[in-house]
Image (cartoon, helix red, strand yellow):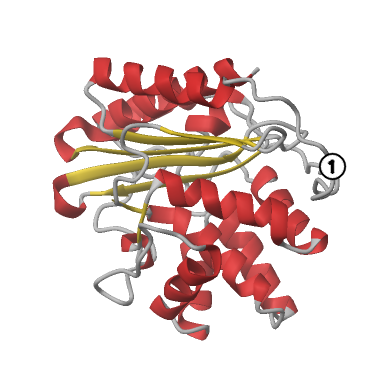
Amino acid sequence: MLGRKSASPLPRHGAVGVAAAALSVLLVGCAPSAVATFPDQQSASETRAKPTGAPAAATASVDQQADARRNPLGVAVLDRATGEVAHGRLAQQPMYSASLSKVIVAVELLERHRVTPQDRFALRRALGPSDDEAMNALWDRYGGSSLITAAADRMKLQQTRPPEEPGRWGDTVTSARDIAAVYQYLLAQMPAADRDFVLDALHAAPSRAADGVNQEFGLMAVDAQAVKSGWMCCQKGTVWVHSAGVVDSERRYVVALLSAQPSSVGYGKAIEDLTEASRTAVTRLR
């Protein structure tokens, strides 16, 4: 079973077809990441660094590239050292979350401080290997759509709302702006143990997801540190491909990239475009 994320999942590894072939060529040779060690969060009393303009430069470059490629893409970049936040032109465009909803749910559940060891195992599976069955279990056990409503309220998310069909967590609506805000909440407001639990699970994500898909695209393909990939097709005739997370070991920068292209474009082209956008953003921040 492929879970309740999408009507048409990314082709499994080894499947025949143009999209699978393109994905294989693009992502071949990637290895699983090692577990990260993240420093304690910045104290509120610490003096922020002077603004650099890097987030604005990154979002402007990504927007320009997306326009040239005719790729509707939302981008948001946060510099936690300076407090700068930059939103691209489509940063507040509502999009289906695909597996990015797993990060939203993980933060909400951990903030309730009632998760069991079994829940933590399921969360690791949902965040790292992107296991849809693990997400299904958590979704059903803890109220499904109400998790998204509670998370949006807790983190003051603006575009995030539950799926119209309660069982389809991949149809949760969100935006690049909101996903960046989720990571900011995770890094700045959660207890260190819970924060590191999520970041380490993301950082240790294997190249191959639980369903056999190569998920090392977007920010994961450019050596980012703690990233969640998302993919889904073909709701509303669209292929949704996302990448969001912490891009450096000092956990200074957060980048969220959400894309929506016509399903006729296919996964191969959509992933190529997202990975190029990721490379552009990260280059501007380094």
Instruction: Residue at 48% x, 71% y: name it.
Output: 153
Please, is residue 205 above or below residue 79 in the view?
below
Residue 263, above or below 52:
below
Q: As drawn, is 201 to the left or to the right of 234?
A: right
**In-front residue for pair 205/92:** 92
> SS of the residue at dot 1?
loop
Q: Is residue 50 left or right of residue 239?
A: right
Q: Amino acid at mark 1?
A: Glu
Quadrant the N terminus occupies: bottom left
Picture coordinates of residue 90, whole percent (x, y): 31, 37
Instruction: Classify residue 18 as left or right of residue 255.
Output: left
Front position in the image: 241 or 180: 180
Can I make out residue 205 in this image?
A: yes
Residue at (81, 59) in percent of width and height: 192
User: Mark 1 = which residue?
Assistant: 46
Q: Quadrant of the C terminus?
A: top right
> At which x and y percent is residue 195?
73, 57
Residue drawn 65% across the image and 25% down it: 51
Q: x%, y% of residue 217?
A: 48, 32
For disc 1, the neighbor class at 10 Å (few under 14, some 14 to 19, many from 20) is few
The picture quadrant where one finds residue 263 is top left
Residue depicted at x 33% and y 27%? 21
